[in-house]
Amino acid sequence: MAEIQPLRTLRYDSTSVGPLEAVIAPPYDVIDDELRARLLAQSPFNVVEVDLPRAPGGGDPYQHAEEVFEAWREQGVLVRESEPALWVLEQRYTGPDGGEQRRRGLLARVRVEDYGPGRIRPHERTHPGPKQDRLNLTRATRANLSPIFSLFADPGNAAAGAMEAATAAEPFAVASDHEGTRNILWRIADPEAISTLEAGLAGAELLIADGHHRYETARVYAEEVGGEGEHRYVLMFLCSLSDPGLTVFATHRLLTGLKDDTSAQQAIREALTRDFEIEQVPADQLEPKADGAGVQLGYMDSFHKQPYLLTLRDPAIAEAALPDKPGAYQRLDTAVLEAVILKGALRMSEDDISHLRGLSYSKSFGDAREAVESGRADAGFFMRATPVDQVREVAETGESMPPKSTYFYPKIPTGLVFSLLE
């Protein structure tokens, strides 16, 4: 089972930085240049200065992160707590249907282990570039700046009940992020309350929802330092699989480099007409419905701008394209698209997909549709969200999904608490 413990956090001192919402940020991999500038305009102490560092004059960004992080600690911008605690985080946000949602979880430290049954499981494949970046940053700061988002089964709602009891007290802090999500923190330091929460998580197997690169970085760093110590643990946000506020969005696939490649265009047409039932649909229905049967994809290219709904003709096609994969994996929309179209018709290699050669992603249906209609992308495959139960089913087979098979929303902010690794 995963080893879950309270932690002695490093955190912002509100008397030095002001409101917490001015210094938090989303995870580094969803921040573009414009958002980074907006966040720093809120406060020179915004966490992006360290978590997504840029040195003045084009110097070493990791050295810059190390210097800034150490300066903030020396100046009292960041303070280290003397006693360990668990932190309950409640996020209130507007869901995709416009309704108000609430999701709760626990910020704790978890012992870094190899992936395996009963402990920690991944659900997506990773890329080498982000892992090297996060490793360089971890070496520089010797800290976990951003929590990994993990899921656990809570069939008796013991953990949920313990978190409910903890939130009866006044919150420690409240901070709204740039998207309007309201983040509410409770610090749980009472030994009895900690024991109750730990009992609710006893025997938990953790499924990483978001932060695979950071977790694999934590494993490398732990072995690199060696021995026992703080570096053997990683900061995590733990959320119940049965939490009613657990929301998953789709991530759409955009293709480029097809405009002048008639053979690639023909290969896509042949694969689609051979393997899929094709139905013309209005453009606003390109995103398949969640309850659609079988493997389904939306498709449109920038040449004809005709939207289609694609339904795999026969499960045997997926079985033939993915002969070494379990049934749960063969039923994934993203896996079938990767095997039949990206690797099959377009002959993309694993390295092409990993380094985004001719492929990009969009988390917004509107953005993905505009990209194709404007010609910014040559074609788009429009995905539906992968249900949480399907994520768990695939993870339990030991397989990892194709990259960007899920988009859990909302993200866990960086900057609520930090965990030192020394």
Image: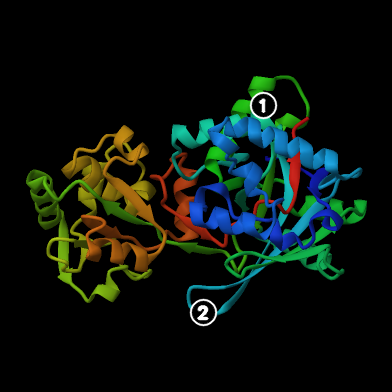
Q: Categorize mark 2 by other alpha carbons within 10 Å: few (<14), some (14-19), many (20+).
A: few
Could you say whether the residue bearing mark 2 is in a helix, strand or loop? loop
Q: Say whether residue 68 is visible.
A: yes
Q: Is residue 406 above or below residue 104?
A: above
In percent of the image, x 29 and y 75: which residue is there? 284
Q: Position of residue 384 (x, y in %)?
A: 36, 63
Residue bearing the label numbered 1: 222
Indicate the position of residue 397 as horizontal and vertical percent values: 45, 42
Residue type of the residue flagged with mark 2: Gly
Q: Could you tell whether 354 is left or right of 62 in the image?
A: left
- Image check: 216 left or right of 271? right
Q: Is residue 6 visible?
A: no
Could you classify mark 1 by the number of other residues whose Cα lies within 10 Å: few (under 14), some (14-19), or many (20 or more)?
Answer: many
Please report contact status of discs 2 and 1: CB closer than 8 Å, yes or no.
no
Q: Residue at position x 82%, y 66% from top?
A: 171
- Image quarter hosting the C terminus: top right
- Which x, y percent locates residue 71? 78, 38
The mark found on residue 98 in the picture is: 2
Amino acid type at circle 1 is Ala
Based on the displayed image, in which of its 4 quarters is residue 103 positioned?
Answer: bottom right
Q: CA distance from mark 2 to mark 1?
A: 42 Å
